[in-house]
Amino acid sequence: MMSRLLKQQQALLPAPAHELAAQMAEAGYKVTQPRLAVLRAAVALDKAFTVHELEQWLLQRNESPGIASIFRTVKLLCDLELFQRIHGLEDCHRYSISGGHAHHLICVSCGALKSFDNCGLRDLITTLEQQTGYHINDHVLELFGRCPRCLAV
């Protein structure tokens, strides 16, 4: 069931942000102004983003609910698998709007994100299972480099 706030904000929200908010509501979570603000920022950034980049985007528009609310919202969206956590090269993690199981190419200069789903690891995983006795039920593959646009500069 769509919340009253989500109905009121429907015309103001980009379609991808509205869809994510609707999925949050379907999962039984309240759709609040701070959560909608985070969704708007994530959709607008259109790349792999950090929590601090979300905050900066929101601060520039006087919409920031505060860094603690942003962290909590990002965690909730990851738990709901609406956002995907991307392990970074440095201590900072990045996030992206989830498109299901995918792997990423991430530009270390601009944060551009390219997803791909066929990583070619199935044979390696089978071999590792046979060699170790482990049952491998998931994996993460993230590759870092410079995108064509940044290489051209």
Image (cartoon, rainbow, N blue to C red):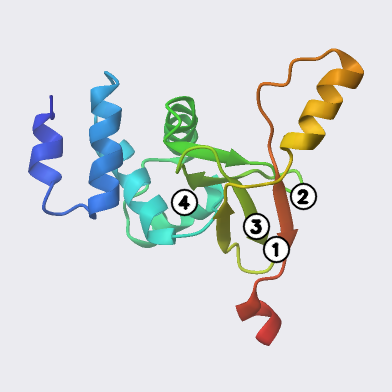
Q: Residue 129 sits in which quadrant?
A: top right
Residue marked by disc 2: 89
Residues at discs 4 and 1 in contact (Cβ within 8 Å): no
Q: Residues within 10 Å of mark 4 (few under 14, many from 20)?
A: many
- Per the rendering, the mark at residue 21 is none
The residue most toward the bottom is 153
Residue nearest the viewer, comparing 63 with 15: 15
Residue marked by disc 3: 105
Residue nearest the viewer, comparing 59 with 46: 46
How far apart marks 4 and 1 lie (CA) works out to 17 Å
How far apart marks 1 and 3 lie (CA) works out to 10 Å
Residue nearest the viewer, comparing 75 with 103: 103
Residues at discs 1 and 2 in contact (Cβ within 8 Å): yes
The N terminus sits in image quarter: top left
- Which residue type does callout 3 highlight? Leu
Residue nearest the viewer, comparing 99 with 12: 99
- Per the rendering, the mark at residue 108 is 1
From the top left corner, tell me how far across and down residue 146 is, in percent: 71, 70
Residues at discs 3 and 4 in contact (Cβ within 8 Å): no
Numbered disc in front, either 2 or 3: 3
The local secondary structure at tag 1 comes to loop
How far apart marks 3 and 4 lie (CA) works out to 20 Å
How far apart marks 2 and 3 lie (CA) works out to 12 Å
Relative horizontal placement of residue 23, taking residue 103 as reference (left or right): left
Q: Residues within 10 Å of mark 2 (few under 14, many from 20)?
A: few
- Which residue type does callout 4 highlight? Leu
Location of residue 125 with respect to 102 vertically, above or below: above
